[in-house]
Amino acid sequence: MALPQGNSILIVDDNENNLHVLSNTLELQGYQVRCAKSGRMALLAINRFQVDLILLDIRMPGMDGYSVL
């Protein structure tokens, strides 16, 4: 199976269960997945890696999803 175009996804969520389920599901479909457990970690990841799509939790402690945007 060929990898989908735009196959790099960053998942941002403070809930580790959500990160685990989403990343496993997407990796099985051939996507390259990176995870961040906070808004601050998401911004660091965005500066280090090129991502094609970000799945971003809005309600997180500290820096919420709106602040990340």
Image (tube, rainbow, N blue to C red):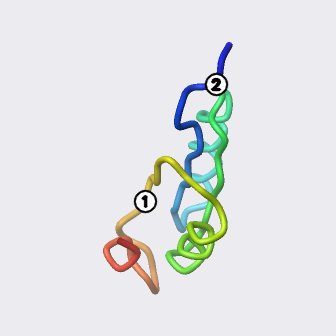
Q: Position of residue 46 (x, y in %)?
A: 56, 67
Residue under label 1: 56
Mark 2 or 1 closer to N-term? 2
- Seen at 43% across and 74% down, the residue is 60
Q: Position of residue 33 (x, y in %)?
A: 64, 46
SS of the residue under disc 2: loop
Q: Mark 2 or 1, which is nearer the eye?
A: 2
- Seen at 35% across and 67% down, the residue is 58
- Seen at 53% across and 74% down, the residue is 43
For residue 12, side relative to residue 44 (left or right): left
Residue under label 2: 3
For residue 12, side relative to residue 58 (left or right): right
Task: Look at the image and tell me in which quarter the N terminus lies.
Answer: top right
Count of marks placed on residues: 2
Q: Which mark is residue 64?
A: none
Give the Cα separation between the discs numbered 2 and 1: 23 Å
Q: Position of residue 39 (x, y in %)?
A: 50, 75
